[in-house]
Amino acid sequence: MVDTTAESDLLDLRKGRPAAGQDPVKRAQIIEGARRVFIDKGFEAASMNDITREAGVSKGTIYVYFENKEELFEALIEEERGTIFKNMYEVLDHFDDLRHTLVKFGMGLSAKITSAKVIQAQRTVVGASDRIPELGARFYERGPKRGHDKVMAFLSEAVERGLLQIDDVDLAAYQFTELCLAGLFRQCIFSYRTKAPSLAEIEHIVTSGVDVFLKAYATEKFLADERASASA
Amino acid sequence: MVDTTAESDLLDLRKGRPAAGQDPVKRAQIIEGARRVFIDKGFEAASMNDITREAGVSKGTIYVYFENKEELFEALIEEERGTIFKNMYEVLDHFDDLRHTLVKFGMGLSAKITSAKVIQAQRTVVGASDRIPELGARFYERGPKRGHDKVMAFLSEAVERGLLQIDDVDLAAYQFTELCLAGLFRQCIFSYRTKAPSLAEIEHIVTSGVDVFLKAYATEKFLADERASASA
Amino acid sequence: MVDTTAESDLLDLRKGRPAAGQDPVKRAQIIEGARRVFIDKGFEAASMNDITREAGVSKGTIYVYFENKEELFEALIEEERGTIFKNMYEVLDHFDDLRHTLVKFGMGLSAKITSAKVIQAQRTVVGASDRIPELGARFYERGPKRGHDKVMAFLSEAVERGLLQIDDVDLAAYQFTELCLAGLFRQCIFSYRTKAPSLAEIEHIVTSGVDVFLKAYATEKFLADERASASA
Amino acid sequence: MVDTTAESDLLDLRKGRPAAGQDPVKRAQIIEGARRVFIDKGFEAASMNDITREAGVSKGTIYVYFENKEELFEALIEEERGTIFKNMYEVLDHFDDLRHTLVKFGMGLSAKITSAKVIQAQRTVVGASDRIPELGARFYERGPKRGHDKVMAFLSEAVERGLLQIDDVDLAAYQFTELCLAGLFRQCIFSYRTKAPSLAEIEHIVTSGVDVFLKAYATEKFLADERASASA
DNA sequence: TATGAATGAGTATTCATTCAT
DNA sequence: CATGAATGAATACTCATTCAT
């Protein structure tokens, strides 16, 4: 987004001053400042003055772009969400190797969710959820929930293809996700782990998780196929 | 106030009367008030005045027992932990019916962790974790971690008894726990679910989770035993 | 915009276009917007942004025409005064029926002064008078005072015509006005009455007021005339 | 007030600390500061910080004694009202000389209402009435309205005694009051008069007002009595 | 020692005014 | 000249903490 702006600046496409609350550069600048402060201090402890200072804009300007503190926080989370879950589901488009696809997706998911940046954002949302429950709900709905739906769709497809045998696909999708995280989420969010898990660790966990998942849900057909391609 | 005091006062002015901030009854009284307020409102929104009122002690007294609001909150969480996870692990002492034991334990765990009260407390801890990371860490360590250890011990025992076949017991224990929660924790903590799951739902999830778990880890011996007892 | 302008622009770029703050149309436009906002919200609660919106001019332009908010308000009041008391005194031009003339005038006066709009304006002026005393003074001088002078002139004329017998015409004029308002002004300005008095009420008050006034000041000649015309 | 405190401190009559918001000395101190600021600047322009400074107490303390700015202002007005209208109606207890009583009462009323202090207070109330109409209403109700009722009672008594002949006592009471003020109130409240009228002026106005009033409402009996006592 | 009245720095938000465009 | 985005001082009010009683 910034890139595009920079580019248009070069071309001088921005004629005159942007309308109040409409300058995307300034908006981004405010959100960036807000991100630093909110992530660092949490919703309640973050003060609009801090954000003012961090963003390098005046108090009034923030209030032109955002109705109030809550809305600013929501906008930040909205952005964050987009960033976090972007490109995470593309890997689910391929069915050629089910196990490999699940591992690859699971690792991406696990790595993303437990990354320091994302954990902190989630911590802030959880903290704020107490006072603004809809905010947490919305975050979950448009983030984790959306991912869950993608996983469900993928599993359904695999069932149709005769690779998996699942009664409750919804539940199975949750099980899959949890098997990929296997304790990491709670450890991270409670600051028990202070740094993100290594890739090796994630691989170990996800490989095992997929194993468990397939032992429970794979069809004979899938296992036969796998044996065949392994011997090839 | 007791006759003996007069005498001992001469010898030791402190005896029989706790030093400042040392009376465990008053301390407990303060923590009890703090619990109600913190759980009800979250860390930031809870005011020391609320706690004062709820605990029935004066402002000054609280500050004799606890350096500040944060320290009081820490002390409360320290206590809370113990209470939440108490009695949860007793069911793991029985091995006569592995599947049944796992389901029973899993349901207890799932119900506890997703109960409104406990979710509230966890939300508050997560929110505060950002500012006081050790707090979350300690909470996790002495709560979830301890439970995890119990599960590990249980699984190890089952392995030794030839009922389960597990390479990485640590990981398997995490997998088991997560299978029992299957999405509930994240849904609850983000306020996506605003009320605790029903017992029926928990039963459905846990039964399926144990199923998956056993399909992955149960030995032939266990399955044979189960078939036998089923036909009996 | 008119064709002739194009020509004169060549000769004199300023011609036809008023200097800064000199265009009476724009000035009127601003005042009209200010009127709506100030009357509606009072001095303090009215925001320059509201006026900007209502007047359909930009912030900067207002500040070209008026030094600041206070000065704009003063200009508005200056105008308002004229509008409020316009046409109120015409009825005083007729002497054919003194009692009737007094009642008619008194009713117009009373209705005007206690009308919602005018009360609002007066309240705003009174409120602002504390900070800008000249403002209230000027309002009174060119409004109520001017009316008082008209009443005095009328009463003097009536005295000369032998209809009234008055020592202190100045005082009598005040008395007449007050008798026509009889408590209404204070009730309205203090918001004790939240809506303007009805015409019937005003008629009752004014009729009685004129009665009192004439009992005190009417000459024998006037009374005789009145009796005569009544019997006719 | 400060003196009293110093004195009682010497005598040590104030045992212990008064309860929060209960110390009448501090309350008076706050109201005194508020009076100065509110009277000087009007409701809106007065800031709680100003009052804090003027009263010599901390922000928090004010908010212990008064819920908010509005309530503080109301408390001040409540006080002011009491002070203003105190002892004003005692003179109405005597009927021995109706004219004299009316003049005496009218002069007290007129002097009071037009005194600088009272005018300023009324101006502040009128200004605030715009935003808080109930406030003005309450002021009127418990101040001017109460006075009006006393006048009505007095006039009714006079009617019963056969001294006056009045159809609408309510209206007559208003007429009497207005005749005593004869323009002064509006002149003062709009800052047209910047200082209170002299006693001589008030006497002139009230004497004339009572004259008009009695010419309109006095019975033959009263006039005969007066003539009699005059010749005596 | 316990109390709770007092403190004042801190909060989010508003709005008259300025000045680059 | 006109514009309206940006400014930041000012607002009412809160609350963790202190300290005289």
Image (spheres, coloured by chain):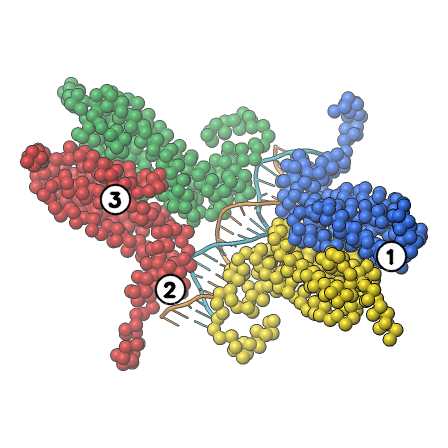
Chain colours: A green, B red, C blue, D yellow, E orange, F cyan
The foreground one among E1 and B85 is B85
Residue at 33 percent of width and 31 percent of height: A147
The foreground one among C9 and A147 is A147
Disc nearest the viewer among 3 and 1: 1
What label does residue C217 carry, if any?
Answer: 1
- Return the x and y of residue D74 as percentages of the image width and height: 60, 58
Question: Relative to residue B191, is residue C10 drawn left or right?
Answer: right
Q: Are marks 3 and 1 in contact (CB under 8 Å)?
A: no
Read off the residue under disc 2.
B57
The foreground one among A37 and D179 is D179
Same chain check for tags 1 and 2: no
Same chain check for tags 2 and 3: yes
What label does residue B111 carry, if any?
Answer: 3
For the C terminus of chain D, give its image quadrant.
bottom right
Question: Relative to residue C58, is residue B5 drawn left or right?
Answer: left
Tag 2's secondary structure? Answer: loop
What label does residue B43 carry, if any?
Answer: none
The alpha-carbon separation of the residues under discs 3 and 1 comes to 94 Å
For the N terminus of chain D, give its image quadrant.
bottom right
From this view, report whether residue A178 is shown above or below residue C177. Answer: above
Residue at 34 percent of width and 39 percent of height: B193
- N-terminal of the two: label 2 or label 3? 2
Looking at the picture, which amino acid does disc 3 mark? Answer: Ala
- Return the x and y of residue D3 as percentages of the image width and height: 60, 74
- Return the x and y of residue F5 as percentages of the image width and height: 57, 36
